[in-house]
Amino acid sequence: MSETVDQGAENPVDVLQDLPTRENCDPNNPEEAFLWMFVGLPGVNGASMIMGPDYYRQVSKQLWELGARPVEEPIKHLDRGQWVYENPADEPEPITDMYARLAAQQRAAYEAKLRARGMLPPEEQ
C-alpha cells in the first residue's frame, strides 16, 4: 500500500502571517495535515497556540507517520478564535449542568440507601 506524500508544499502556510486553518493547510503535507487542529486548544486563553508552530508541525508529521489521516469533515469550525459546533445539537452538555445533574442523581441514590437502612424516614408519596 503506497501513496504519494507531499513532503513539503511549495507554499507552506506561514503561521507568522496567517493562522493555520483547514483551508490554508495542505491535507497531503504531513507537517500541515493536522496543523490547523492545534489552534485554540481547550483551556487555552489568550493565545492561538501554546507552543510554537514548528513544534505543531512536528506533531502533525508524527501523527501522519503513525497512520492518522484527515478523513472526516469536522463538526466544528473556528469562529473569531472560538471553536463552535456546526450543528448545535452536537454540542456537549455544559460541564456545570452535568455536575448539577450528577450531584442530584448521587444525592438521590445516597438518600435511597439511607432510607433502605432506616436512617431516613420513607419518602412521602
Image (spheres, rainbow, N blue to C red):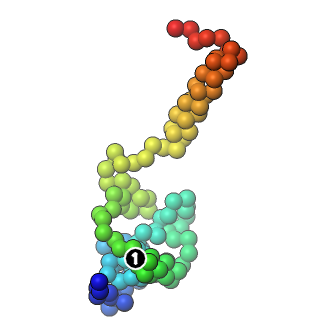
Furthest residue in direction right, as rendered:
119
For the N terminus, which image quadrant?
Answer: bottom left
Left or right of 27 on screen, residue 99:
right
| Residue 11 visible to the viewer | no
At 63% across and 23% down in the image, what residue appears?
Answer: 113
Q: Vertical placement of 108 versus 125: above or below?
A: below
Q: How many marks?
A: 1
Toward the top, the furthest residue is 125
- Residue 93 in sight in this render: yes
Residue name at image x 52 percent, y 8 percent: 125
The residue that disc 1 covers is 67
113 relative position to 62: left or right: right
Give the x, y percent position of residue 108: 58, 25
Q: Quadrant of residue 84?
A: bottom left
Rendered image quadrant of residue 28: bottom left
What percent of the width, then of the height, locates residue 85?
36, 53
Q: 16 and 115: which one is in front?
A: 115
Q: Secondary structure at mark 1?
A: loop
